[in-house]
Image (tube, grey):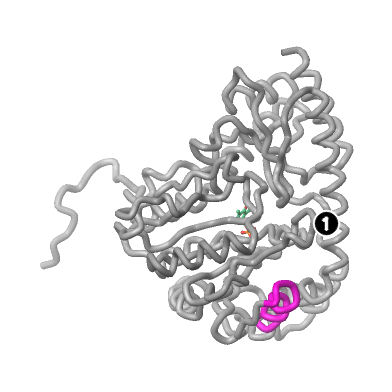
Amino acid sequence: MMAYKKDVQYPMDIVADRLKNIPSYLFMQMREKIRQTQAKGVDLISLAIGDPVEPTPDYIIEAMREAVLDPANHQYPTDEHKGMLVFRKAVARWYGRKYGVPLDPETEVLALNGLKEGIHHFIMATVNPGEIVLTTDPGYPAYKANIQLAGAEPFDVPIVEKNCFLPAFEDIPEKVCRKAKAFFLNYPNNPTGACADAAFYARLVAWAKKHQILLLNDNPYSEIVFPADRRQSLLQAPGAKDIAVEFNSLSKAYNMTGWRIGMAVGSDKIINAMSRFKENVTSGIFNAIQLASIKAMDDGDRAIENMLTIYQRRRDMVRRVFDEIGIMTKGGDGTFYLWIAVPSGSTSLEFATKLLDEASVLVTPGIAYGQYGEGYFRVSLTVPDNRLEQALERIRKAVKKG
Ligand SMILES: Cc1ncc(COP(=O)(O)O)c(C=O)c1O
């Protein structure tokens, strides 16, 4: 007879242990806060979430329309979990054209149902329970949650202003390096806006090879860099493909957050492991989305430049107002976020709460991204200019009032 649940409990404990210690996802909480505040009739302006408000460009919508009309695209996606070969070829073209990185579409490219899912698949495919995964603090909250879900151990590597928000990875203790399987990075960086350069990546790859640590650069903001010639891929570093992958996404560059399409590129061994994991959990991405995304990547440079003009204008607007009210906005060179020092005397949460209560403006307190985020708050530039102007005016009044 099969041994079965020795101590039956009433009521039944439905939630798995692996989920119990994971806090609810930060941006879900934010969306709930927005919903509740708006339900009270408050005219809330949210500068807290990075979701571009401008529509997906017309030429991509047109390609989607055509693809949807073709019944062949209504069946299971071609090449299933890997992504259509034509899509993978377009990704390889894009990386070749933009970064001079050659990629084999058969073995070095994998389609993702949005970049975020790739984070989970990477860890499940490469990291064993009990192994360490290095992440930066502050950092995108999905890394740590997925490391914990996989039974691995997150280790925070601080990124601080005096190091231009780049990790001092050479200072990570030897005993941590020995247990570490992978290192999650994200440049251009959310939330700090910092960018990494070629020299940093070259040092990082050499260090990772020495310690046998896999590298993952989460790079959805690759195109949102000021000036654009600072754009960089980790895969440009010599030997990177031996040990690294980069994730990218059409979400931010082409205003396609709702479409859920991204890609993992780099080391064929990591791509193969992820692919073997994915074949068991997903059947791929709607062909029509992949076909429209090919068009986006092949013909989208003008659309990206237009978006950069918009974000540059909004960066200037925010900086001007914060300068006037005496709040430092050094900011980084990348992403559509500004990482701003909290005025002295309050914590990031107190300051964000003050803006919410007194100005009906929602910003993200730095502490939400980790302990080294304390002392800062993040402003997203993905709201229309007129709403940003109103938000800034309200912030100015609230800060002046003290
Ligand atoms: C650092 C970072 N990685 C990943 C994502 C998610 O990207 P995607 O929409 O492609 O899943 C975001 C979205 O905000 C992000 O900021």
| Residue 301 visible in the snapshot | yes
Residue marked by disc 1: 55
| Residue 258 visible in the snapshot | no
Give the x, y percent position of residue 310.
86, 50
Query: For residue 387, what is the image quadrant?
Result: top right
In the figure, 83 relative to 301: above or below? below
| Element carrying mark 1 | loop
Query: For residue 347, what is the image quadrant?
Result: top right
In the figure, 117 relative to 391: above or below? below
Q: Is residue 98 rendered magenta in the image?
A: yes
Give the x, y percent position of residue 147.
41, 55
Q: Is residue 351 rendered magenta in the image?
A: no
Residue 26 in the figure: left or right of residue 335: left
Give the x, y percent position of residue 260.
65, 63
Q: Residue drawn 71% across and 51% down?
A: 335
Q: In which quarter of the image is the N terminus?
A: bottom left
Magenta residue span: 88-100
Give the x, y percent position of residue 276.
44, 78
Q: Residue drawn 54% across and 77% down?
A: 81
Residue type at mark 1: give it.
Pro
